[in-house]
Image (cartoon, rainbow, N blue to C red):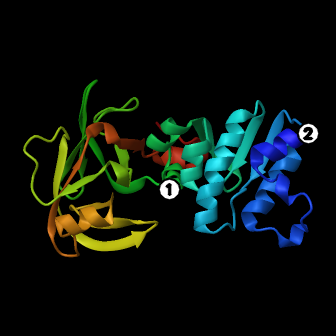
């Protein structure tokens, strides 16, 4: 018991009335109660819910240190994508009570296997199109807007397959000039439609003939003069675009969903 209290830094709370504890202190006490039993399996159901932003940030760091020190298998339930990335080794996505994808965290986040998985992991479904060219290294997707997108194939694709494209906003680079030496295979001329501040960064929504979204720091946006209406260039690497094969009609009608 003493070692757990010392590790969590809550020995001074032993004589406190639980009703007087702060949100962060209450979470630590609950965690201590679970740790003293030396569990083989620990279930944490949204342990940072209802904490204010500052308390949550501090508690997240402390909790991560605690979990790394334990030998127990931890099942961590969360709606927070940042927590899933920080704490998880294996990620299980659930939608309407069913598991829709599971695997290593980075793999699931970067390659969602369905539209539902893309929405849960924060990938932005930008467009649908048809595979017009494909080889081992690159696939070209023709969009209804007339644009073409170059993508690294991530499954068994053939010319004529219909696909949805998903792109994580943090993989899109925005500039006001076309970069001459960019390694990105896709550079789209676009126009800023809307800018929204969220969680300390700016969400920049742009129209490249299809919708894209990128993240910028406030300082970067100021330096670039980002505001609705201006023209920009959006760059994204072929390896950063995920393809989700659109199921055939028979598959949609109950004969299985064949996804990449």
Q: Quadrant of residue 221?
A: bottom left
Helix, strand or loop status at disc 2: loop
- Please provide percent x and percent y for residue 248: 45, 44
Q: Quadrant of the N terminus?
A: top right
The residue where tag 1 is placed is: 119
Q: Nearer the viewer, residue 219 or 225?
A: 219
Q: Is residue 86 left or right of residue 161?
A: right
Which callout, 1 or 2, points to the residue nearer the camera?
Answer: 2
For the residue pair 157 and 58, the one nearer the viewer reads as 58
Above or below residue 259? Residue 232 is: below
Q: Quadrant of residue 153?
A: top left
Q: Residue at x 46, y 66 (%)?
A: 199
Residue 87 placement: quadrant: top right
Q: Is residue 133 above or below residue 30?
A: above
Q: Which residue is mark 2?
A: 37
Residue lying at the far top in this picture: please name it. 136
Question: Residue 170 appears at what percent x and percent y?
Answer: 36, 51
- Label 1: how many Cα within 10 Å (few below 14, some 14–19, many 20+): few
Q: CA distance from mark 1 to mark 2?
A: 38 Å
Q: Is residue 79 visible?
A: no
């Amino acid at each position: 018991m003493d070692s757990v209290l010392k590790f969590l830094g809550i020995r001074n709370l032993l004589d406190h009335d639980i009703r007087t504890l702060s949100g962060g202190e209450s979470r630590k006490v609950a965690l201590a109660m679970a740790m003293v039993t030396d569990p083989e399996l620990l279930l944490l159901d949204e342990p940072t819910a209802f904490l204010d932003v500052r308390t949550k940030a501090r508690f997240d760091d402390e909790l991560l240190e605690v979990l790394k020190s334990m030998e127990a298998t931890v099942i961590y339930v969360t709606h927070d994508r940042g927590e899933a990335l920080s704490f998880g080794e294996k990620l299980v996505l659930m939608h309407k009570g069913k598991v829709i994808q599971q695997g290593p965290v980075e793999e699931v986040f970067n390659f969602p296997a369905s539209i539902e998985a893309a929405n849960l992991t924060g990938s932005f479904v930008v467009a649908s199109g048809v595979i017009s060219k494909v080889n081992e290294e690159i696939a070209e997707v023709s969009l209804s807007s007339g644009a073409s997108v170059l993508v690294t194939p991530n499954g068994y694709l053939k010319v004529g397959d219909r696909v949805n494209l998903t792109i994580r906003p943090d993989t899109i680079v925005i500039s006001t000039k076309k970069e001459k030496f960019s390694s990105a295979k896709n550079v789209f001329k676009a126009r800023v439609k809307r800018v929204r501040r969220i969680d300390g960064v700016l969400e920049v929504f742009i129209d490249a003939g299809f919708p894209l979204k990128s993240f910028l720091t406030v300082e970067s946006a100021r330096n670039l003069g980002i505001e609705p209406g201006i023209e920009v260039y959006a760059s994204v690497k072929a390896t950063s675009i995920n393809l989700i094969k659109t199921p055939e009609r028979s598959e949609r009608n109950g004969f299985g969903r064949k996804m990449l």
